[in-house]
Amino acid sequence: MIEEKSLNFLEEIVEEDLKSGKYASIHTRFPPEPNGYLHIGHAKSICLNFGLADKYGGKTNLRFDDTNPVTEDTEYVDSIQEDIAWLGFHWDNVFYASDYFDQLYQFAVELIRKGLAYVDDSTAEEIAASKGTPTIPGTPTPYRSRTIEENLKLFEEMKNGMYKDGEKVLRAKVDLASPNMHMRDPIMYRIKHAHHHRTGDKWCIYPMYDFAHGQSDSIEKITHSICTLEFEVHRPLYDWFIAQLNIYPSHQYEFARLNLNYTVMSKRKLLQLVNEKYVDGWDDPRMPTISGLRRRGYTPASIRNFAERIGVQRRENIIDVGLLEFCVREDLNKTALRRMAVLDPVKLVITNYPENSFEELEGENNPEAPDHGGFRKLPFGRELWIEKEDFMEIPMKKWFRLAPGAMVRLKNAYIIKCEQFEKDADGNITEIHCTYIPESRSGHDTSGINVKGTIHWVSAAHAIKAEVRLYDRLFKLENPAAEEDFKQSINPGSLQIITGAYLEPALAEANQDESYQFIRKGYFCLDKKLSQPGKPIFNRTVTLKDNWKKD
RNA sequence: UGCCCGAUAGUAUAAUGGUAGUACGACAGAUUUUGGUUCUGUUUGUCUUGGUUCGAAUCCAGGUCGGGCAACCA
């Protein structure tokens, strides 16, 4: 039987609107402000907006909400488009709120003509004071009663640059006593003599969010304008402007934004991490940005699947990063090529294997793929590198790996037995001596010996050296944003750089578009920014799930 | 304090007046040449108090708790 997947509340609304004939088709939009890079929270919104349109045969616009030239930049415009495309979504149009500045100005004039807007000369402090408090109604400023003619003249003078920043604003005349603070004569336009990344110096007045967003939606005939919960109180204003202007009635719906534990999700905080060099940039692999996740090795499919699994609701939530990690493991397990890499090496000598003699073994590329994904060559010899942590001088209970006298399987090779080991003056293990069982070669094992443990290795004579970067969560606390200073909870060990890792030779042909599972260690990919031909740098995307419980 | 929104296992998310289900996690077992994958099983939940009803997670009322709103930010 086929279980029908239940709809989220927005899908229900859309289906109802389509069924009732309210709309023949739907049109959504994704409206980022180009003042920072997109993060995983935006990915949720992108998947929602584009996903809704895809599912119901509608369209989605990308619209840059660029009404504040002081914080916005084309660098962000470019990165945003790159990230959305990388996630696998296609927009119907790219628009900018600034495309509508002329139209918006006309809308404002129209409201002035209707007596629904006025120029206010008060300072920001005076306006704030006159708005009252949630429990005390606001009071009009002396400018509220200006005539329509005067307002028309002053607003045009504002546009023509006759006033300095902050000298005047245009306000909507709504209701100073409204219990909703956003209805107490909100500011529509402010003066900013600032260069805009698209309109240059054409304008010195810029519309506020409340007088740009809904109007832009309406101009584009957006049917379902989906935003996050904090804009809920703006909805009456959104509807008011549309009603007073009598323009296309777009409707706003709100959902709860994504929160992830052990990270921060505000552009302001992420910008701080970048500016104050706590990270390498917006695309640092520890950042929750889309570009960071991409550099880390996350796949578009894993992020889309994550967005699907977390769902859409109106209640506040904090998602466990473990779910994101699950999604990327699930995806990479199916596709990543298996390779061997020793991150923390110790020499292993097979004393009964001839010196200066090598043989070529084979290893499957991916046990999950049809025909094992093919095989790659694996040179084997007398001297190998293995992981330090795979040897214990005094083994603990349930230890399956190497220890004096113990036997393990070398992955895709032979069973070996540990005969002795050498230590330096400080007690560090420097060399392990084993004997191998010639009849135990993988695929041709006639030894009849069964071992519990299998470890990875690389031939010392053939290994290539590489830098490997291991990442941990950027913050020590589940909810760093709740702290007085979120930077206090930065995890000092979030990046571990290993310069002397040994990789199997097949990894010399590693390419940037592929993910690799370093057997028993995790999923890795080349760092697209720092890796050089001949000097590879690998990023750990995520560890393998570790069910082994010591003790 | 005024207005708005929300509350289902540890975390998310279903059940749309009729058996509280699913995923992740955790725990146990099977399989395994990755202590991976896969498979099986176990565990844990309707914020509270009333009301309506044959029947309430769902509808109503009061309470509790959490979030949002008083930027010339979005």
Image (tube, coloured by chain):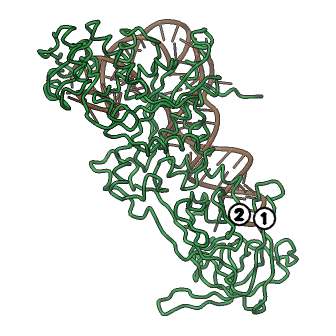
Chain colours: A green, B brown
Residue A408 shown left or right of residue A25 in the figure = right
The three-letter code of the residue at mark 2 reads: Arg
Residue A513 shown left or right of residue A181 in the figure = right
- Front one among A479 and B73: B73
Residue identifier under label 2? A338
- Name the spot of residue A146 as percent of width and height, x first: 16, 10
Quadrant of res A109: top left
- Name the spot of residue A317 as percent of width and height, x first: 45, 36
Quadrant of res B68: top left
Marks 1/2 in contact by CB < 8 Å: the verdict is yes
Number of marks drawn: 2
Q: Is residue A400 above or below residue A143?
A: below
Residue identifier under label 1? A364
The three-letter code of the residue at mark 1 reads: Glu
Chain of the residue on which disc 1 is drawn: A
Quadrant of res A227: top left
Q: Residue at x 71, y 76 (%)?
A: A408
Mark 1–mark 2 Cα distance, whole angstroms, equals 7 Å
Q: Is residue A118 above or below residue A10?
A: above
- Secondary structure at badge 1 equals strand
Q: Residue at x 44, y 52 (%)?
A: A282
Q: Residue at x 55, y 29 (%)?
A: A93
Q: Let me know if residue A547 appears in the view.
A: no
Q: Residues within 10 Å of mark 2 (few under 14, many from 20)?
A: many
Q: Let me know if residue A69 appears in the view.
A: yes
